[in-house]
Image: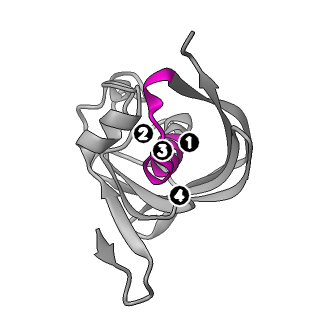
Amino acid sequence: MSDDAGHGEMLEVADIQKVMEVLPHRYPFLMIDKVIKMKDGVSGTGIKNVTINEQFFQGHFAGNPVMPGVLMIEAMAQTAITIVACADGIDTKDKVAFFMSIDNARFRKPVVPGDQLEIPVELVKKRGNVWKFHGEAFVEGALACEAHFAAIAIDTAE
């Protein structure tokens, strides 16, 4: 962790090991490589290095590979859950987060192999075990995707 320009807030990075510790997702459905700039469970930025080796490029679209928009929204959700789980010290072993809603999704720019997605996500509201977020995905500063979404944490322990 490093200090945020003397403002007293601590910034945290979740590397791939930490991401895999808090998320149940694995290849080919793990959509983020790390989360940077995490602040107090309310914001952070996911990083996804998009490579031609991604399984979805085999059929989306042959000869003109484009990352599916729904997978960019999934990357936002994985970023959000990582931010919340790391900040609150939540043991995610017996919990799973599910989408409740996706609103105002907009797709602005195709994402192709070789791109790096920067995925800033911000907590908008929390009520009980329900979280609402706003997320965006950028490639080299250009907005590729944005959406509002909500998730609920379900306890899977019996």
Which amino acid does the dot numbered 1 rest on?
Ile
What is the C-alpha distance between the residues marked 2 and 3?
Answer: 30 Å
Segment tinted magenta in the rendering: 77-94
Look at discs 2 and 3 and give the one toward the viewer: 3
What is the C-alpha distance between the residues marked 1 and 3?
Answer: 18 Å
Is residue 138 shown left or right of residue 19?
A: right
Look at discs 4 and 1 and give the one toward the viewer: 4
The circle drawn on residue 40 is: none
Look at discs 2 and 1 and give the one toward the viewer: 1
Per the image, label 3 sits on a secondary structure element best described as: helix
Mark closer to the chain start, 2 or 1 = 2
* Of 121 and 106, the residue lying toward us: 121
Which amino acid does the dot numbered 2 rest on?
Val
What is the C-alpha distance between the residues marked 2 and 4?
Answer: 31 Å
Task: Give the x, y percent position of residue 82.
Answer: 45, 45
Q: State the residue position of label 1.
A: 73
Q: State the residue position of label 4.
A: 41
- The image quadrant of residue 7 is bottom left
How dense is the environment of label 2, judged by Cα within 10 Å: few (below 14), some, or many (20 and up)? some
Residue 131 falls inside the magenta stretch: no
Look at discs 2 and 4 and give the one toward the viewer: 4
How dense is the environment of label 3, judged by Cα within 10 Å: few (below 14), some, or many (20 and up)? some
Q: Residue at x 32, y 35 (%)?
A: 21
Per the image, label 4 sits on a secondary structure element best described as: loop
